[in-house]
Image (cartoon, grey):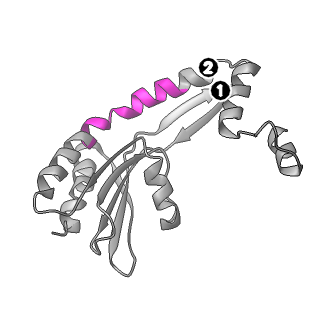
Amino acid sequence: TPIQNRDAFAVGRDLVGDYGAKIVGMADFRHGGASLMVVDLMRPITVERDGVTDTMDLNLLVKNSHDGSSALTFALLAERLACTNALQAAIAGAQRSWKISHTPNAQERVSLAVKAIKEAVGYQEKFQAVAQKMLDTDMVDAEFAKIVARLWPVDPEATGKVADRKRE
């Protein structure tokens, strides 16, 4: 039971009217089998360190599929999607996401997701506070070394140029 774009994208219209958001992109892809909408929530996340200010847009991505390849997906992103090539990575990295299968009772789930999205708009303030706190907290070299070791593990027995580069 395909969820129609008018129903899937209604949250964008609601956010524009209720919160001053702005629809910044819409696209069809997979030969019309899927559509997406990107909504800038107009609530940027701003952090500062050493006099340098970094601003990230908070966006809602709505992806709808009519070809049966995927569920209706809502994802809150702290980035703007540049192209559909990055779509799956953006959804996987979303801070909050909701997926609704195209079933006869999908509209109930869409309504619940929309309610949660509207409540999550306040997430920007909490995210900004936590991000700023993280930037303001100095990290000792030993903590940094542990993070690097988890992200780029090197087998202690490994040899060769690749292992040397990873260790470096």
Q: Which region of the structure is painted magenta?
A: 117-131
Q: Nearer the viewer, residue 52 or 91?
A: 91
Q: Describe the element under mark 2 as helix, strand or loop.
A: helix
Q: Residue 94 carries which label?
A: none
Tag 1: amino acid: Arg
Q: Earlier in the sequence, mark 1 or mark 2?
A: 1
Q: Residue 136 carries which label?
A: 2
Q: Which residue is drawn at 75% across and 40% down?
A: 154
Where does residue 4 sit, x and y in percent of width and height? Answer: 19, 68
Q: Which residue is drawn at 80% across and 36% down?
A: 156
Tell me the quarter of the picture where residue 2 sits.
bottom left
Quarter of the image for the N terminus: give it: bottom left
The residue carrying mark 1 is 49
Give the answer, above or below, for where 135 lies relative to 80.
above
Task: Check residue 160 for magenta coloring.
Answer: no
Distance between the alpha carbons at the discs numbered 1 and 2: 7 Å
